Image (cartoon, rainbow, N blue to C red):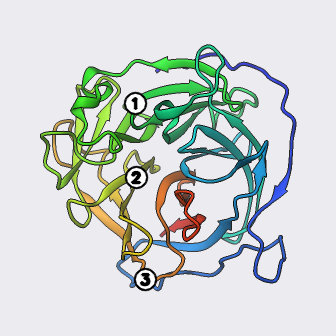
Amino acid sequence: MSVSCFISIALVTLVVTLGQTAGGDPATPSLTGELFNFDKSKRAKITSTYRIQGDKLNDISAAGLSGIAWDQDENSLYVVSDFGDIFDFSISIVNDKIQKVKLIAQYPLRDKSGKRLKGKLNDAEGLDVANARNGIAGDTELIVAYERRPRVTIHSPYGVWLDTITLGELLASRKNHRKPNKSIETVLVHSKYGLLLGPEVAMAGQSPLHHVIFNQNGDQSWSFRTGLNETTSFSGMEELGNGDLLVLERTFDDISSPFDITLRRINFSECVPGSICEAETLMIANSQEHLNLDNFEGLAKIDDGRYLMVSDNNENKTQRNLLSLIVLR
């Protein structure tokens, strides 16, 4: 997949410290420690969780966080929101603990004419980064996937529209998705298959007990069984070192009801298009047992052994924007 040329714009850097503890120390995460006691058969754990308090830049709160991606070349963590904003964070991780998170900048996603995306057009859900690990500074391009109006666009880190990726009719047409707000949820540029897209739930007419991953044209697909039941949503995916996938699933209705967060390894490297891929559960965390959970929607790869996931607070005072570090073993 080709990506557009990077558009150079001067960046004004603003620094805001987030996630203070109850004691007010901005240098430590608000939530610390290993959150889960896994048995030896499990192969993933959350080693640290940091609460993003919702500080503002340009009068825009860091809220409704959904898609997330790590830019290794720029040392930047990019996050898109349900309201069409890009947030640029810096993050400090020491000994697999999140020590500090800073909000560096905020920009609105813009359309081809330069106007801010509004209404149903701004529901950004999935995010990946092109040119993030090539050792070249200044060529970052953000690949953004949307619900409600299913599509994929390419933007500069400053929200400037660079290109729109043409999708096959199966994915681009709203009528093919089970619900308007359950369409494209996650996007990934895979080392072998290029652009991959994951709807939040199975498409109309497909089994609700399977999640499906599509290529850009929609003419190739891979399925895997949902982790728990037919209410389980497909929230994020990242590539593991061997070409397999790490996927994030959740069963979440609202913060007052019990919910689960699941991480699974999909045997994607050996899975033939059109077939059902083997899936291994690495972690299941239930909100009744673990307090530091919320509506996790985004997954980002730092390196082959460490990943981040972010939660969407839905602009609800009873919810939190949490950033959790996952270590695979």
* Mark 2 or 3, nearer chain start: 3
* Front disc: 1 or 3: 1
Residue ID at (79%, 42%): 58
Q: Is residue 206 left or right of residue 259?
A: left
Judge by depth and name the residue closer to the eye, 166 or 133: 166
Asked if labels 2 and 1 touch by Cβ distance under 8 angstroms, the answer is: no
Residue ID at (77%, 72%): 20
Q: CA distance from mark 2 to mark 3?
A: 22 Å
Disc 2 residue type (three-letter): Ser
* Mark 1 or 3, nearer chain start: 3
Disc 3 residue type (three-letter): Phe
Q: Is residue 52 left or right of residue 187?
A: right
Secondary structure beneath disc 2? strand
Q: Which residue is mark 3?
A: 38
Q: CA distance from mark 1 to mark 2?
A: 17 Å
Disc 2 crowd rating (10 Å Cα; few below 14, some 14-19, many 20+) is many
Rendering coords of residue 39 (x, y %): 39, 85
Q: Which residue is mark 2?
A: 235
Judge by depth and name the residue closer to the eye, 206 or 196: 206
Rendering coords of residue 167 (x, y %): 35, 22
Secondary structure beneath disc 1? loop
Q: Which residue is mark 1?
A: 149
Residue ID at (76%, 51%): 56
